[in-house]
Image (cartoon, coloured by chain):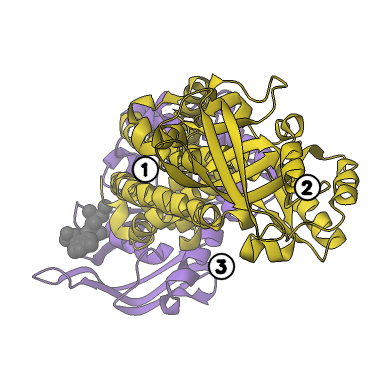
Chain colours: A purple, B yellow
Amino acid sequence: MKLIELYSVTKIYDETIVPVKAVDNVDLQIDKGEFTAIVGPSGSGKTTLLNLISGLDQPTSGKIVVDGTDISTYNEDELINFRLHHIGFVFQAYNLIPVFTAKENVEFIMLLQNISKSEREKRAIDFLDAVGLKDRINNFPTELSGGQQQRVAVARALASTPSFVLADEPTANLDSVSAESLLDLMEKLNKEHNMTFIFSTHDEKVIRRAHRVIQLRDGKIEKDVLMN
Amino acid sequence: MLFILAWRNIWRNKKRSLIVIAAITAGLSCGLFASAVMYGMYDSLINTTIDRELGHIQIHSPKFEDEKIITDTIPDFQSVVSNIKNISEVSGISSRVIIEAMCSSPTSSRGVKITGIIPDEEKKVTSIHNQIIEGNYFESNIPSQIVIGKKLADNLDVKLKSKIVLSFQDFDGNIVYAAFRVSGIFKTESSIYDQSVVFINQRELFELLNQSAFSHEIVLRLKSFQQVDSVFAKLSKSYPLLSVKDWKLLSPEIKIYYDILDIQLYFFMGIILFALLFGITNTMLMSVIERIREIGILIALGMKRSRIFVMIILETIALSLVGGIAGLIFGAIIIAIVSSTGINLSAFTEGLSQFSISTVLYPVLPLTFYPILTLMIILSAIIAAIYPAIKAIKLKPATAIRTY
Ligand SMILES: Nc1ncnc2c1ncn2[C@@H]1O[C@H](COP(=O)(O)OP(=O)(O)O)[C@@H](O)[C@H]1O
Ligand SMILES: [Mg+2]
């Protein structure tokens, strides 16, 4: 089942002196349940591609269809609402609101979705439990390790019941042990809940964990390989 | 949760927030104190005027108001007095005879207003008896006593026990001369009053004029200042043919003061808040700029821009209210402390006595001031927040997230 479809998508940054073609005429399809890595050297367009898929950025040309809806025509407000209900985000680092505890961080996304207080609390605890942080729910981000913070971010992403989770270099700021265990967690959630994960990385060890690897170079797909 | 977020956010940069909070606290408490001093002056002006001469409510014959002629008496004044005595709010009632007269000493003469009183009744209404500096206030039974002001005594060059002569027209237009002996000299806050008003026993006036008791002026004092409006309304209805006036009507210049003082003080506080507003805006702007990435993440996650806007506004209100409420409390404490001792203005008494302000000033503020100021603080916070909030909602999430 098609989850994400990109047709001739191009993104040009033209506010710069020399316009940059960050994503160059990309056609791509991602199915439900995939565990896919977008890889490539720094500056190859990974972040830009993920931002286009998540509606954080709009393509210069081309069509992006997510969950059957064409988001390339959405305006900013529609995109905000789309992101809130369809996409779980995990960013590279400092994902969390520093003045909120782990539980409050997870709850907050559900508050934005207008979910009732009791439901929010219950789900926040469940998801923090699922990422192995049951005993850290009342800790503030500064009291958690980098790996634990990323787990909270994963819990937050799942709590919004998204169609898929996008993670832009989620392990870039982690030591290799934490990176491994974050991937273990993501893979487990992928397997047990059939949750689609799309993550970018340039770390060889992380790449090896992906089920499908899409390799970018200069904004173009250089290679698209299924692993096993 | 948005409130928790706002509240915790203001404590992230404690030092910076505390500086603004301290500025707001200082600005507001000083402003509040200055307002209370102004209010206290005004209060003292009203109270001294009421205590000295006006009382709370006065009743005259309508004609007396215009012409001040001796024959314009209050018809059937005794029944008016006895009726009013039954009103529970009334704590004192004095029926006065008012006659314009010439007052002469061997060396000089001056125009004065004779106030013929029943001393024991007058004492319950006005406070001249407390302001006697020489002699006493009709304490002995000696006939022909007169109590005059210090300034008049100086003008006429008379002392205690000096003889002075009053001359005035009787009911038929003939001039009456009568000699009195100064038995008391008073000094009030108003030098104008002190040189123009003399008191004698009204019984002696009736004898001099060969008349049975009459009255030009009925003055009443109520148990509390707050009862004036209701009693005034009641009396106006009961005596449509008489002229019933409360202190505001009796002293229009005080009333004008009364009307504009509040507006003046709110305006004054508004200026202080306006000045503080720039500091608040600056602080919030710094706070937004420091959090570009964080706000970007919130927008990325799907937080509506209107909610981001509200979040920044709430933070600003929280910040301002912490300082604001501290300022109000602090100001109220200063006012309470200072007004328990009063500010001694005796060094400036000469100048102030022209304005009828007493020498010890008690700063006060009506309680309604506080909630209205709280609203003004919130309003200022909202105004201060607009620019930083607009900055925040204009952030592009994709770019903001790349900002570290
Ligand atoms: N906002 C922007 N304005 C101009 N150029 C940009 C912007 N964002 C990214 N780029 C450029 O687009 C290219 C792709 O960047 P990016 O998507 O961040 O790559 P990656 O995530 O693979 O490092 C780079 O050359 C980068 O400099
Ligand atoms: Mg990147």
Between marks 1 and 3, how big is the CA–CA gap? 26 Å
Q: Which mark is residue A1?
A: 3
> For the residue labelled by badge 1, is the local secondary structure a helix, a strand or a loop?
loop
Amino acid type, label 1: Pro
Specify the subunit that label 1 lies on: A
Q: Which residue is mark 1?
A: A170
* Left or right: B120, with B135 as reference point: right
Q: Nearer the viewer, mark 2 or mark 1?
A: 2
Q: Which residue is mark 2?
A: B210
User: What percent of the width, then of the height, locates residue A189?
Assistant: 55, 43
Q: Residue sitting at 61 percent across and 47 percent down?
A: A193
Quadrant placement of the N terminus of chain A: bottom right
The answer as to whether the residues below labels 2 and 3 share one chain is no
Please determine whether, in this image, residue A198 is positioned above or below residue A119: below
* Left or right: B220, with A78 as reference point: right
Between A14 and A33, the one nearer to me in the picture: A14
* Left or right: A105, with B207 as reference point: left
**Ligand 1 quadrant?**
bottom left
User: What percent of the width, then of the height, locates residue B363?
Assistant: 49, 32
Q: Indicate which disc, 1 or 3, sits on the residue closer to the N terminus.
A: 3
Q: Nearer the viewer, mark 1 or mark 3?
A: 1
Amino acid type, label 3: Met
> CB of mark 2 within 8 Å of CB of mark 1?
no
Q: Residue sitting at 51 percent across and 43 percent down?
A: B103
Between marks 2 and 1, how big is the CA–CA gap? 111 Å
Specify the subunit that label 3 lies on: A
